[in-house]
Amino acid sequence: MTAKNAGKARVAQGAARPILSAGLATAAALAILISLGVWQLHRLHWKQGLLAQIDAAEHAPPRELTDTTPPLFTRVTVQGVFRGDKAALYGAEVRGMHMGAQEIEVLERPGDRPVLVMLGWVATDTGRVPPVAGPATVTGYVRVPEAGSFLSAADDLEGRHFYTLNPTTIGASLGHADVEPFTLVAMGAPGRWQAAPQPAETLPRPVNNHLQYALTWFGLGAALLGVFGVWAFKKEQS
């Protein structure tokens, strides 16, 4: 081998080392990006099944509420009596030009534990809405209890305005410490009982952005591969 050829070989070997190192790093990063994209596709399939389950539950006849906590995203119906003396508020939500919250009352059931019913949104900047009173049949879905955190707003026990959905605490403020360990969110057309509160009209549906997330990860992987290819080509030519 001539000295000239030996020099070219050394130059080629010197250029190959960083390309190989960068290639290994690129392959590892590409594997991670593809894995994240595949995981989002699995999440997409799971979320689509969940949304289909919610759609089916929304069109199915409601089940009668029993002593067993019903599954999530299941419509149930219950009969009882609203005492009409006290109501609690939960959360804070602006609708239109008004600040409001969800109104909660106790539905008493003869022979069964009372149930907290989230009747719906009421405006709180125009004064308290009189509590609902009398016999009622409520159709809705179950919300499980929430656990407060240091980020949660402090509950106003005296004003019966709560920011953590804890049935035991809210029930006690309304004179019932023995309520069911969940809250029933009433569903119906706006103004079902009176001008307010405004009940939920549909079951809650989680956001499904997993296809966009998957395409983002796969797109980043393709961009990474393209950048590496251009860089390696220029490296070999230099």
Image: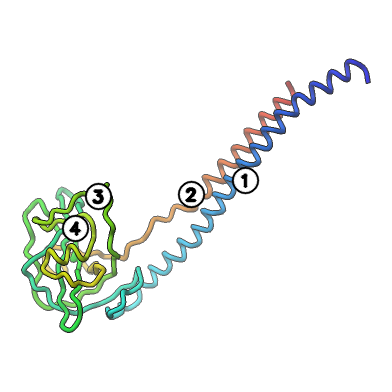
- Cα gap from disc 1 to disc 4, whole angstroms: 46 Å
| Quarter of the image where the N terminus is located | top right
Residue 104 image position (x, y, % from top left):
16, 64
Q: Does label 2 or label 1 sit earlier along the sequence?
A: 1
Three-letter amino acid code at the position of disc 4: Tyr
Residue 90 is marked as: 4
Left or right of residue 74, residue 36 in this image? right
Q: Look at the picture and state if 218 lies above or below 137.
A: above
Which residue appears at 13% of the width and 77% of the height? 81
Q: Are marks 2 and 1 in contact (CB under 8 Å)?
A: no
Asked if the residue under mark 4 is in contact with the one under mark 1, i.e. CB atoms within 8 Å, the reply is no
Say which element carries label 3: loop
The span from disc 1 to disc 3 (Cα, nearest Å) is 39 Å
Looking at the image, tell me whether mark 1 or mark 3 is earlier in sequence order.
Answer: 1
Q: Which mark is residue 78?
A: none
Q: Position of residue 139 (x, y in %)?
A: 24, 74
Q: Disc 1 designates what residue?
A: 31
**CB of mark 4 within 8 Å of CB of mark 3?**
no
Looking at the rendered structure, the secondary structure element under dot 1 is helix
N-term mark: 2 or 4: 4
- Image quarter for residue 102? bottom left
* Residue with the mark numbered 3: 152
Q: Quadrant of the C terminus?
A: top right
**Depth check: 206 or 173 in front?**
173
On the image, which quarter does residue 76 sit in?
bottom left
- Say if mark 2 contacts mark 3, CB within 8 Å: no
Identify which amino acid the numbered label 1 is placed on. Answer: Ala
